[in-house]
Amino acid sequence: MTKVLFICLGNICRSSMAEGVFKEFAKTAGRGDEFEVESAGTSSWHIGQAPDSEAQATILARGIDISDQRARQLKAADFNECDYIVAMDRQNKANLIAAAPPGSKAQISLLLDHAPEQSERNVPDPWSCSQDVFETSLDLVEAGCAGLLKSIPVKG
């Protein structure tokens, strides 16, 4: 099983949406059983909380329910338990690289590096922003998740 972990700052908006989107895309592609997918934050601010209500509403409008998710913080073990750790923005990627133990197994990447057709490299943090920012963030998350899924070899 391939383990994918999506990372943002608080794990209540962007990475939560990415977890839900990637699971749905993998399932739709007939690859759902190949992956274990989670999300986490680099901060401890929202541990145990459900995703932001606006994030939930935005992604639910596209048919994906993330209401059962609960925020957690990145832990050192993730670097060896995960195959891919995918950051939503450059700052979180830099934090991941700084925190990664020497020789860790996880491939660290920026989500939008998997969507080279996008001009943006950072998924904007929509927390406390307008609905438009949530929609933009989710559009970018979908583009990145589609590219990431295509880049991971099919197992079997």
Image: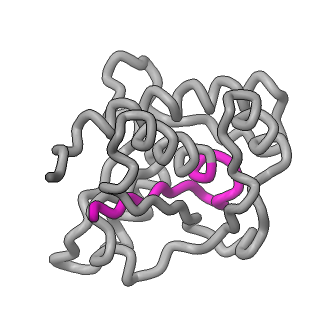
Q: Which residue is drawn at 27% across and 64% down?
A: 1
**Color scheme of the displayed model:** one colour
Residue 151: x percent and y percent? 22, 38
* Residue 10 within the segment the image draws in magenta: yes
Please tell me whether residue 148 is drawn above or below residue 74 in the rendered image: above
Residue 135: x percent and y percent? 70, 25
**Front-lying residue, 131 or 148:** 148
* Residue 83 within the segment the image draws in magenta: no
Residue 111: x percent and y percent? 41, 41
In this picture, residue 2 sits left or right of residue 10: left
Q: Residue at x 50, y 73 (%)?
A: 74
Please tell me whether residue 27 is drawn above or below residue 83 in the rendered image: above
**Front-lying residue, 70 or 36:** 36
Q: Quadrant of residue 95?
A: bottom left
- All told, the count of numbered labels is 0
Q: Give the range drawn in magenta.
A: 1-16
Please tell me whether residue 103 is drawn above or below residue 152 in the rendered image: below
Residue 104: x percent and y percent? 22, 75
In this picture, residue 83 sits left or right of residue 127: left
Q: Quadrant of residue 93?
A: bottom left
**Front-lying residue, 58 or 111:** 58
Q: In which quarter of the image is residue 29?
A: top left
Q: Residue at x 20, y 71 (%)?
A: 105
Residue farthest to the bottom, as pictured: 77
